[in-house]
Image: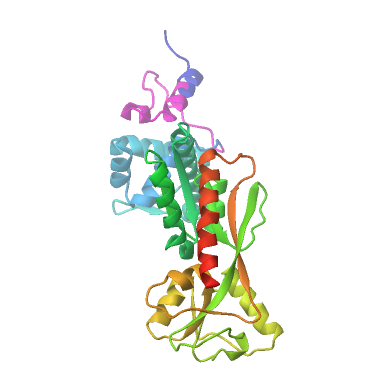
């Protein structure tokens, strides 16, 4: 049966969306006419993929290799994409493809498409691997990932040797993003987080402590801090924001000459003799080589919060992890009173 022009073109567009065969790139040839897409036709996913590959790889040949197709096949898809759009995506100069102004304007939007596709793949992987109920993914801020969370994990594994646990250290905003993308089951952070679709569970108030290589005794006031020696935390850190407010309200003219992103890094600089810092009690207690931390007067604390999706009930695994987390925090907080 001989296909008419529109039927041939519809079949070709269908082939363009298939990815399993190199022949999917080749337009049908059983017609005496050449059917080109009408200008203004939206780009098909396969055309977007070829455009993205060329922009990423830098040449048509390397793009074809990335897509596992022949160079002529990729060239045909590019030509059809340009015909659909009604403008050129690349200038041909000396055997090279040079992106046009329009192509460069399009690229950030195409990047966003492929980021979403990558997110979708990660989401489907996570949903597939979570079906058996034998795994959990936890994200925590770096300070808690150096001592507290490893102790929790070790205790849990001792009682559940067959479980799969994935632990990752990252900062709060990334933890929120990955929870919402189903990439993490639990997040353990400092501070309070408010986000649609997210549940924040208060675990404990962790005292802030002064650490200083120049040892001292008893509680210390922020007014006693030597501004020349003070190592501050990044302004994005909830602890840093609180400390900055306290100092501003007390009209203490302290401006950190050094700011670091993690409590651990601040503690390490103190250990090396770089000055003094105010960090969470977990870091102050467990960072090796530090003198005994000193409490603040008046006391200040940072909230330890567990985050998870609001539309998901906590699994039995997650509940067990939370119980152990509270238990280990209690051990640390009790040691401060001795």
Q: Residue furthest top?
A: 1
User: What's the colour scheme?
Assistant: rainbow
Q: Residue at x 31, y 41 (%)?
A: 64
Q: Residue furthest right?
A: 249
- Is residue 31 on the magenta stretch? yes
Q: Is residue 263 left or right of residue 204?
A: left
The answer to which of 325 and 86 lies nearer the viewer is 325
- Residue 316 percent across, percent down from the top left: 54, 39
The answer to which of 99 and 69 lies nearer the viewer is 69
Q: Residue at x 46, y 39 (%)?
A: 126
- Residue 94 percent across, percent down from the top left: 29, 54
- Residue 76 percent across, percent down from the top left: 37, 36
Residue 118 seen in the current view: no
Q: Residue at x 69, y 88 (%)?
A: 251
The answer to which of 331 and 61 lies nearer the viewer is 331
Does residue 147 lie above or below 221 as drawn?
above
- Is residue 206 on the magenta stretch? no
Q: Is residue 237 left or right of residue 4?
A: right
Q: Which residues are magenta?
A: 11-40
- Residue 102 percent across, percent down from the top left: 50, 52
The answer to which of 320 and 218 lies nearer the viewer is 218
- Specify the quadrant of the image occupied by residue 46: top left
Does residue 29 lie above or below 331 as drawn?
above
- Specify the quadrant of the image occupied by residue 15: top left
Q: Residue furthest front?
A: 338
Residue 301 seen in the current view: yes
Report the predominant secondary structure element of the magenta stretch.
loop
Give the mark count: 0
């Amino acid at each position: 049966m001989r296909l008419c022009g529109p039927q041939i073109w519809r079949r070709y567009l269908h082939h363009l969306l298939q990815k399993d065969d190199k022949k999917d790139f080749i337009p049908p040839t059983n017609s005496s006419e050449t059917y080109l897409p009408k200008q203004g036709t939206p780009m098909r996913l396969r055309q977007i993929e070829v455009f993205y590959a060329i922009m990423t790889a830098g040449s048509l040949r390397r793009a074809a290799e990335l897509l596992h197709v022949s160079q002529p096949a990729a060239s045909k898809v590019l030509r059809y994409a340009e015909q659909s759009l009604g403008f050129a995506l690349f200038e041909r100069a000396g055997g090279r493809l040079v992106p046009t102004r329009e192509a460069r304007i399009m690229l950030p939007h195409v990047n966003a498409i492929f980021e979403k596709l990558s997110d979708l793949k990660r989401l489907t992987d996570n949903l597939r691997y979570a079906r058996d109920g034998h795994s959990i993914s936890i994200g925590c801020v770096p300070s808690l990932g150096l001592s507290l969370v490893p102790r929790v994990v070790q205790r849990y594994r001792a009682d559940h040797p067959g479980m799969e646990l994935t632990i990752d250290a990252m900062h709060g905003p990334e933890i929120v993003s990955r929870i919402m993308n189903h990439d993490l089951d639990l997040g353990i952070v400092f501070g309070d987080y408010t986000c649609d679709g997210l549940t924040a569970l208060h675990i404990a108030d962790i005292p802030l402590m002064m650490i200083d290589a120049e040892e001292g005794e008893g509680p210390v006031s922020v007014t006693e801090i030597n501004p020349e020696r003070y190592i501050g935390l990044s302004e994005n850190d909830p602890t840093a924001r609180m400390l900055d407010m306290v100092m501003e309200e007390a009209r203490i003219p302290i401006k950190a000459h050094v700011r670091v992103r993690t409590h651990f890094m601040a503690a390490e600089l103190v250990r090396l003799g770089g000055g003094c810092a105010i960090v969470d009690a977990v870091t102050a207690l467990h960072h090796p080589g530090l003198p005994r931390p000193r409490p603040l007067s008046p006391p200040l604390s940072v909230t330890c919060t567990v985050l998870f999706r609001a539309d998901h009930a906590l699994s039995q695994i997650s509940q067990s992890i939370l119980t152990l987390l509270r238990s280990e925090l209690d051990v640390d907080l009790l040691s401060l009173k001795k």
